[in-house]
Image (tube, grey):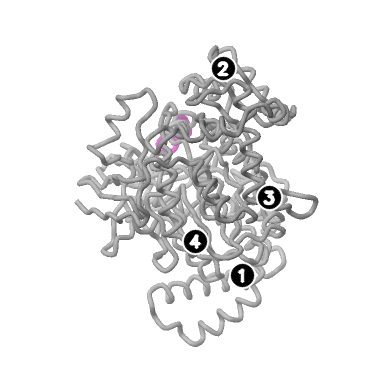
Amino acid sequence: MVQFDTPAVVAPDPQANITDLLVERVKKTPQLALFAVPDGDGWRDITASEFLNQVVALAKGLVAGGIEPGDKVGFIARTTYEWTLVDFAIFFAGAVMVPIYETSSSTQIAWNLSDSGAVACICESADHEARLQEALAELPNVRSTWAMHNGDLDALIEKGTAITDDEIERRRSIAVGADIATLIYTSGSTGRPKGCVLTHSNFVELSRNSAEALKEVVAKPGVSTLLFITTAHVFARLISILNVHAGVKTGHQPDTKQLLPALGSFKPSYLLAVPRVFEKVYNSAEQKAEAGGKGKIFRTAAHTAIEHSKYVQEGRRVPFMMGLKFRLFDKLVYSKLREAMGGRIEYAVSGSAPLGERLGHFFHSIGVDILEGYGLTETTAPATVNLPGKSRIGTVGPVLPGVGVRIAEDGEIEVRGIDVFQEYWRNPEATAAAFDGEWFKTGDIGAFDKDGFLRITGRKKEIIVTAGGKNVAPAALEDPIRANPIVGQVVVVGDQKPFISALVTLDPEMLPTWLANNGLPADMSLDDAASNEAVRAEVQKAIDVANAFVSRAESIRKFVILPTEWTEASGHLTPKMSIKRNVIMADFSDEVDELYSVPVSTSNVSLS
């Protein structure tokens, strides 16, 4: 059994809670710009002391609105400044937030609020309010609802003026480190969502230790970040709290279609993103170059960047001609990409799915170090992460301070330490099954290299065993295929089947550009594109790339392009864009059966 433990670098404080992080920040730097909000074509700063005043005012409103210490309060909203404002106001009122994904259905809302025992819920928009109202018939314990679009937060603040500062100070000080801070429900990719009890210490100790480990990222003068992934997810939630502790100026952009313009105006120094974002940036740049007749130049520049990064990472001397080409492409190509991302980004923290070495090396060479990490809701997001000066592309990094990670005999990753959740809410059976003593069993498969860098190879429950007894990790095939610009999502199938196959969907955003660049009608429907020979050939090319990484027995022998899109709204993706494999396998069982209705020869065969 291989095990790596990294001692905490900050002394633990079992009495501290999350509110202390904001109070300490205001004492240190009251006039530091802690947030920026959209203001016309630019951004308006909000200082640490201004934020604290707004938090306390809203906390008073919640108290006046009947919220008691320990109460659970649901919250449905997009990724905006108000999200973090409400989050800290709930903490200051002594209550516990139950975040709900803004795309959740009324049934999902009802489950999270009823299972948690929530007594109130705040929502942002009329759409959220409609879904919440639909769920209320099943929620007799919810006694108050507030809608931000109706001005209810302002009304609460007005109502709370009679509440004293001393009362808020008393309430915010009630919780100690071991107390519940938030109840975050899992995405439900493997069944009904379970409530993860995350404590104040989970956030406080992880924030303090991570800030030290990542000080080159979060402690530089003028540091800032633009959040655009959902703050209801533990990954962005931790970063929001970490930023308050570290003094990082944070902006928000809830509409990812407006991401590039927002990056251009906000100019962050680091980003938090999922791999799909980096794939989109790369693919968009490639297709834009193709449309301008510069596709070959871009691909050569990308190849040079990747090879250059490999030389640098391995500590080898870069050949003279490669160095010359690299400097040339830096002026012609890489600098333009950096400028499109705001021009100041040095680091990007990536999680939720494997990034792939190709993209890691590409972005590293253009001047953006992607620090890939690994974690789950149950580990308050990160357990491992690559660090400035201690990074290895293709891995998810070393173990964070205060955390231990071991690999069980069957290859399962197990975690203990400051980041591990307390329990599954009202589910002792699931809690007992998830732990081996103090070690949380993640369900993921991985391995350490000799230097303590972790590499993820798949999900334990997702390992496919073919009829011939071959074990296949789907992610090893799916990730390279998904990197192709026209591929939306892919699911590898073949459990107890004679060979491996794949279900593929197309990316509706990238498809029109690719079609136009290849002399085909840009407005071609998904139905027509799914059976188009040029499209099929492009998907086959992506599959050939993936097959090159695996043995013959593990390679994809058949595929079908589905004339549909898998989204969170369709029920096939989680809010962090992970595939719900069990749902897809159930909904597309006929297509899977069709793939195996006719045997294949020794060559790859596609299915129309």
**How far apart in space, not on screen, are marks 4 and 3 (Cα)?**
28 Å
Q: Is residue 348 magenta?
A: no
Please tell me whether mark 1 or mark 4 is closer to you in this view: 4
Asked if residue 418 is positioned above or below residue 296 in the image, the reply reads: above
> Which numbered disc, 1 or 4, marks the residue that appears first in the sequence?
1
Secondary structure mainly formed by the magenta segment: helix
Kind of residue at badge 4: Ile
* Residue 220: % across, % down: 54, 65
Q: Nearer the viewer, residue 9 or 525?
A: 9
Q: Which numbered circle lies on residue 370?
A: 4
Q: Amino acid at mark 1?
A: Phe
Q: Which residue is mark 3?
A: 46
The x, y position of residue 482, in whole percent, is: 51, 51
Instruction: Please check the rendered image and state whether residue 596 is part of the magenta-colored stretch, yes or no.
Output: yes
User: Which mark is drawn over residue 298?
Assistant: 1
| Image depth: mark 4 or mark 3 in front | 3
Label located before the other in sequence (1 or 2): 2
At mark 1, the secondary structure is helix
In depth, the one of 72 and 385 nearer the eye is 72
Give the magenta range. 589-598
Q: Position of residue 214 (x, y in %)?
A: 45, 60
Cα separation between marks 3 and 2:
33 Å
Residue 358 in percent (x, y) is at: 47, 63
Residue shown at the point (64%, 58%) measured from the top left: 284
Identify which residue, 230 or 324, lies in the foreground.
230
Spatial distance from mark 1 to mark 3, Cα to Cα?
A: 40 Å
Which dot marks residue 103?
A: none
| Distance from the alpha carbon under mark 1 to that under mark 4 | 20 Å
Query: Disc 3 marks which amino acid?
Result: Ile
Per the image, label 2 sits on a secondary structure element best described as loop
Label at residue 142:
2
Direction from residue 174 to residue 220 in the image, left or right? right
